[in-house]
Image (tube, rainbow, N blue to C red):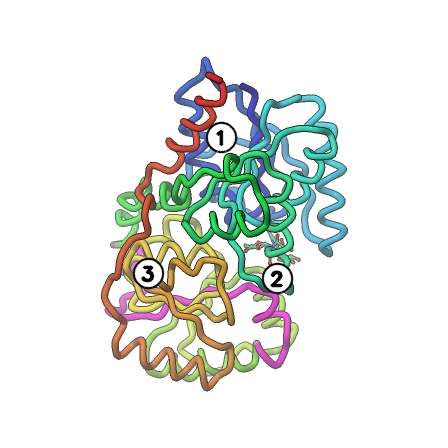
Amino acid sequence: MRILHVVGARPNFMKAAPVIREMANYPGLFSQLLLHTGQHYDRQMSQVFFDELDLPHPDVNLEVGSGSHAWQTAQIMMGFEPILIDFDPDWVVVYGDVNSTMACSVVCSKLDYQVAHVEAGLRSYDRRMPEEINRLVTDQLAELLFTTSDEAIHNLEREGVDRSKVHFVGNVMIDTLVHLLPKAQDKWSHLSSLYPYDRYLLVTLHRPSNVDDLATLVEIMSALDEISGEIPVLFPVHPRTRERIIEFGLQPDKSKLIFLEPLGYLDFLALQAHATLVLTDSGGIQEETTYLGVACLTARSNTERPVTISMGTNQLVESSSEALLSALRSRLAHPGAQKSIPPLWDGQSARRIVQVFQEITNR
Ligand code: UD1
């Protein structure tokens, strides 16, 4: 079975790694090609993950880079088409909800290649999010849909996706976490000498809704500035966010806010595991904190991952200074104990995905 994996942006890498590794255990069954679209390209946004996750060097890198949604999507589609025809795979496996995921799914379905979508069925029901459009389109086109939760299955059923295409396999991102947590913990003694705090708040922000709007980013930065007087704040800054902070002149003067470069997988996982509280707008971090039992505030009005609220440690918060400060103070006073880990978030999801492909081969 010829498998073409598509990755493009930071959150794809930790999802693809366990699937590629599991397939590599069956060399007689799978022949794999790894394509990187180059949507993310800085060392700290891309190469560091290949190194730390033991991902093979991409066979093809389209080196598309940054641009508007239409430009980036079109570049990916044009670069991907000849590679697809040349490799002629039985399945193309796409991950998550970034522009690369949708762009390659569209190319495949026009040329009659079958798409398997890992992390299908997540819905925020907010079409202002570019990722929601990517999720909707990809799931309509996919022939195999691998889901992380019950809600995802219901969402797909509601959209008329044939139930026989949907497989509840759990969360591949948690496969990577389980696999690499011991290695991340080995980095803790070095990190804790750099950041010698018993308690700290870990922050990540990159959603356009939070960082591209001046008024919203001012509210968030003012809350972070103020809370940094009460607890050290570690803030690895995404390139999009860094550009906006500089553009809007929002770097606080005397704040104890500690800005860091984007971190590699292991450093960030170690900092997450030891954090008192995490404030984020990322999708994956809502899931990782739930698994780790670390309190999490998500600066968004909705989430496509509601299981992290119903079973996990996540809580949504509005991106106003007042709401953020109130939620931060209240969670810092009562970070809240571990609730539970969602079903099948057990480190075995890639194995289940590969089993589905094996069953298809045997049909
Ligand atoms: C993308 C994904 C988002 C994901 C996020 C994780 C889409 C629509 N968005 O958002 O779902 O959560 O990745 O990071 O696919 N930049 C660099 N270096 C890089 C990459 C980007 O400097 O390696 C800068 C560029 O100025 C670029 C900006 O960051 O314009 C945004 O990058 P882009 O890939 O468009 O979107 P993200 O915000 O990273």
Residue at 57% x, 66% y: name it: 241
Q: Is residue 208 magenta?
A: yes
Q: Position of residue 234 (x, y in %)?
A: 39, 67
Q: Position of residue 128 (x, y in %)?
A: 64, 65
Crowdedness of circle 3 by 10 Å Cα count: few (<14), some, many (20+)?
many
Residue tagged by mark 3? 312
Q: Nearer the viewer, mark 1 or mark 3?
A: 3
Give the Cα distance between marks 1 and 3.
33 Å
Identified by mark 3, the residue type is Gly
Mark 2 residue CB less than 8 A from any atom of ligand 1: no
Crowdedness of circle 1 by 10 Å Cα count: few (<14), some, many (20+)?
few
Image quadrant assignment for residue 315? bottom left
Q: Position of residue 93 (x, y in %)?
A: 55, 34
Q: Are marks 3 and 2 in contact (CB under 8 Å)?
A: no
Q: Residue furthest top?
A: 28
Q: Nearer the viewer, mark 1 or mark 2?
A: 2
The earlier-in-sequence mark between 1 and 3 is 1
Identified by mark 2, the residue type is Met
Write down the region rendered in magenta. 189-216
Q: SS for tag 2?
A: loop
Q: SS for tag 3?
A: loop
Residue tagged by mark 1? 56
- Residue 19, placed above or below residue 207: above
Residue at 53% x, 48% y: name it: 156
Residue tagged by mark 2? 129
Q: Assign ligand 1 to one image quadrant.
A: bottom right
Identified by mark 1, the residue type is Pro
